[in-house]
Image (tube, rainbow, N blue to C red):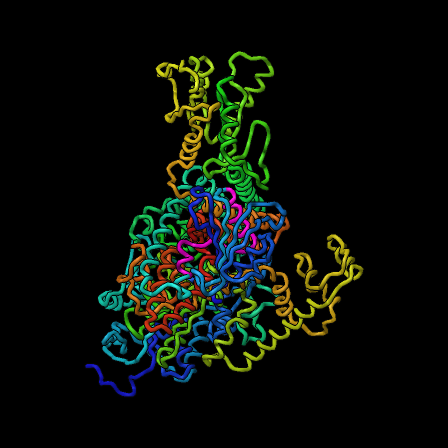
Amino acid sequence: MARAKDKNNQYDVIVVGAGHAGCEAALATARRGHKTLMLTMNLDAIAQMSCNPAIGGLAKGQLVKEIDALGGEMGKVIDITGIQFRMLNTGKGPAVRALRAQADRAQYRMEMKRRLERQDDLEIKQGTVVEILISHGRVRGIKTQLSQKFYSRCVILAAGTFLNGLIHVGLTSFTAGRMGEFAAKGLSEQLAGLGFEVGRLKTGTPPRVDSRSVNLAMTEAQNGDRPPRPFSLWTKKLRRKQLPCYLTYTNEKTHEIITGGLNRSPLYSGKIVGVGPRYCPSIEDKVVKFPCQRQHQIFLEPEGRETSEFYVNGFATSLPEDVQLDALRTIPGLEKAAVTRLGYAIEYDYFPPTQIKPNLETKLINGLFFAGQINGTSGYEEAAAQGIMAGINAVQSLRGKEAFILDRSEAYIGVLIDDLVTKGTKEPYRMFTSQAEYRLLLRQDNAAARLLKYGLRFGLIPEELFQASVANEAQIEKILKALQKTRIMPSQANSLLERKGLAPLKQPVRLEQLLRRPEISFGDIRGMSQLELTLTPELIERVEVEVKYSGYIHRQLAQVEKFKRLEAQAIPEAIDYSGLKGFSTEAREKLQQIRPRSVGQAMRISGVTPADISVLLIHLHRGGGDDQGARRGREVGARVSAGLSSSGPAAVS
Amino acid sequence: MILEETIVAISTPIGEGAIAIVRISGPRAIALADKLFLGKVSLSAVPSHSLHHGKIVNPKTGALIDEVLVSVMKAPNTYTAEDMVEINCHGSILITRNILELVLDIGARLATPGEFTRRAFLNGRIDLAEAEAVIDVIRSKADLSLKVALDQLKGDLSGNFAEIRRNIIQALSVVEAGLDFSDQVSDIDACDEVLQPLKKAEKIITRLLCGSRIGQQLREGFVVVIVGRTNVGKSSLFNALLQTNRAIVTDIPGTTRDSISEQIELAGIPVRLVDTAGFHASSGIVEKEGIKRTRQQIESADLLLLMLDGSDALRKEDRCLLRETEKHSRLLVINKIDLPNLLDIGRLRGLPVPQKKIRTSAKRGDGIGDLAKIIRETMLNGQGPDVSEPIVTRVRHQQALKTTLRDIRRARRKVKRGGEEELLAVDLQEALSTLGQITGETCNEEILEHIFSQFCVGK
């Protein structure tokens, strides 16, 4: 018997799932003052890192910084529970640098749980959701396996790999959400019945070994940065001692054993139907696809401070136990390895993300939001990013306020969600820097400057933090002005240039011009400026970036301006493409399905040509009705068409 | 004024009439036209809806392009409701295209299909009820220009564009792999792996722009070579064609002028007409040199006018020439029809003879007009009466190639200096996006595809 609605089972928002998406979503809605219920199948697996014990990395590190600037939790938690921090790509330009940290898996879980438990307006319960309650196209709440009913106006579904999860080890397979945890049944079927398209993806994880069985002398230790830098704006200093990781390699013997076991691989025997990520290949994939490569890197990463387990990064596999073991033991250092957990592959249901709107709400059911892996993404950071966005947007929707959408020029989060809702994905989607067309603008060093204002707007960032960032930006501006003004005589600069093996100056230049040369650093010219400020390394880095990139930043900013014009041209939600003439068949179908919210988004849909966009513009401006409306429509359209042809897509004469 | 960009297009079928119109619309229309216009008045100072006589001059070189009439129409009472300028020039493809290119060089952009009409609509000049018609215009023009663009992209040019693109993608993949997977892609000799494909791409572009048939055609027009044995009347035909058609005076570099080669315009199409030394079977050293040169000219021809003497029997040299030029695009000209016919056409049977033939008397001028027409048709080769699309498409190709070349060179300089990979990537992405505007392909997914197939990345 379901209880009647009473105050005790009424919430504003229900978050289903307590992984990285669910945690950020629940914290965001509760912090915005809305009574939130978070349901998880297992209270001891909150914020579980199902795969590698690490946060950040290339492009992902940027995501964490962005989540942090919006007021999310991931950066703060990893700063406390990290065991090794490294800045990647230090040899490359600042736009592509990124932070990565090894995590203490158990501590990360506990620290996140602690924070959730201390959050006002947030209740956490253990329970398995088997049904979304829906009436008249709007979400009403959820029902659990035990027939408990909880009611809310918004539900954020963040179910990870749990929907009809199926684990494979060799030719053995069984249903599970993660190793050792139940799969969630019923939800996919219900949603499919409502008209949702359900797809199948696959991912995998490597075995773990007992570090006491590893001969570390045979491996290469990799240490963290000294001093380490934190992810979060809230973290003043990282205090805890860092642990090393260890690098070793596979060899031809390893590959031979793996090849010999392929007939019992679920991947190669055709048992697995889900599509796996190309960027995260299993070891058997690597061996098969790159037969000429004689060795592959294997990283042994500590799972935590209190455990002796190592994560064998680079060795994801779903081969049978004996093959995993035999192959591992050919690797230097792992000759006597004791495996604590076997590697496995998992297939799970996802909902191709063209079914959601840019605010992560489903197109079919009002108030139902999807976040994380069920949208076809992979990675904790991608999930967390969607989580906080879904949380913020659920509240926007409750309050009848405008959706919060970051665009592609503002944040990696914007690129991520726009890619998902516009292009969909057929493999687990991972963030890469090359997916961002304005990569030079979306840097980790300016995430605060880009996004804190939004965190503040939604009450997730305190005023002081925002003001500190504003002051910081003002200081950068001041330094840049000084560099633009100060003129340097050849006599002042030539000894420096000579030392660097550069041609001497013949005429005076501005300091900025000098700094723009790739060989010159801020440290080199600091003495020549009259700046008497105490500058942090971060500040100096920002100044260098702004100066050295300035030409390219200007180019990208000009492109962004055009891009923004197209994004600003809204397409009414109610538009029915099937009744409009002039579109190609393919364009009509795609537009009808994806229902872009702006002309800019429509242009990014594959199969929609510039001619289709012209036709769309005409239709948009006919819809104006009265004369004034029509004129207004035309003006917008004219602004848009000004940006249209030069902003990229094939323009036919 | 709402629209910020100024657009330009050739708004008359090129090569058809004696006059062509280059139409400019947008806020800078008058200012841009003024930069090219040399007349008694400055266009910025003239009243709306007025017509002015003057010259179009290349502002960089000072070279005269054409004598023109320019009409200036100020917003809002114009077709697009924007400032508009129409340059009425001579209806020569070369001149029209030259003017179009100049306007583009100083800051306008090519109009998209139906854009003038679309602007007219957006600016309120066209009734809402006419919107449907506007859609039809856009659709049909887009389809036509797409077809033409695709036609032109077939064959040689297409292969070249694909090759340029492939090389840039190759280089960019290496750069991107180094950025997105720096912890995994072991230090490849990135410098060389990026430089090599860029060098290749640059070489192809340079060839396309300068050395190739397309580049040549862009600069000089089609090459028509007159061949035949001595005394068939080659020089007479050459002169006859020169006399009945206007010689072109241009500032285009590379235009060669000598006694045996003239730049002329045949029925609106720019043509370099080449006379050759008589084809001679038995020969001394001097003549051998002459024949070697003739062979080179045959090789460079877009069209051969193969001449036979109608007042003489078929000779060994004639047969030899017919066989030797079999693979070329050619036209058979039987000359000297003012004299009694002694050429037995039946004797041509069994020889590779051009499908099209024409009878002329170069001396009297008989058939010269028809010859010009046939040459024109042959050269346009089924592209229909409206040749403006192919021409505009070519301008587009040329501009795209130039921009791509600029970006590749920027990138190469960075590779040589080392570092700045993320900026290098921007240069290459811009190059790809420029090429994408021609080929209609985007590349984001392709780069990743390339990386995953080439490098074993991912943990």
Q: Is residue A19 magenta?
A: no
User: In the rendered picture of this protein, how many numbered marks are placed on residues?
Assistant: 0
- Could you tell whether B254 is left or right of A563 in the image? right
> Magenta segment, which residues?
B94-119
* Residue B180 visible in image: no
Q: Position of residue A576 (x, y in %)?
A: 28, 65
Q: At 31% from the left edge and 57% from the top edge, which residue is drawn?
A: A582
Q: Relative to the observer, which residue lies in front, B58 or A171? A: B58
Q: Position of residue A494 (x, y in %)?
A: 78, 57
Q: Is residue B104 magenta?
A: yes
Give the farthest residue toward the bottom.
A7
Q: Quadrant of residue B257?
A: top right
Q: Relative to the observer, which residue lies in front, A202 or A580? A: A580
Give the farthest residue toward the left.
A1
- Could you tell whether B317 is left or right of A182 in the image? right
Q: Relative to the observer, which residue lies in front, A202 or A650? A: A650
Q: Position of residue A641 (x, y in %)?
A: 43, 62
Q: Is residue A289 above or below residue A83?
A: above
Q: Quadrant of residue A505?
A: bottom right
Q: Main secondary structure of the magenta part?
A: helix
Q: Is residue A258 above or below residue A581?
A: above
Q: Position of residue A536 (x, y in %)?
A: 65, 71
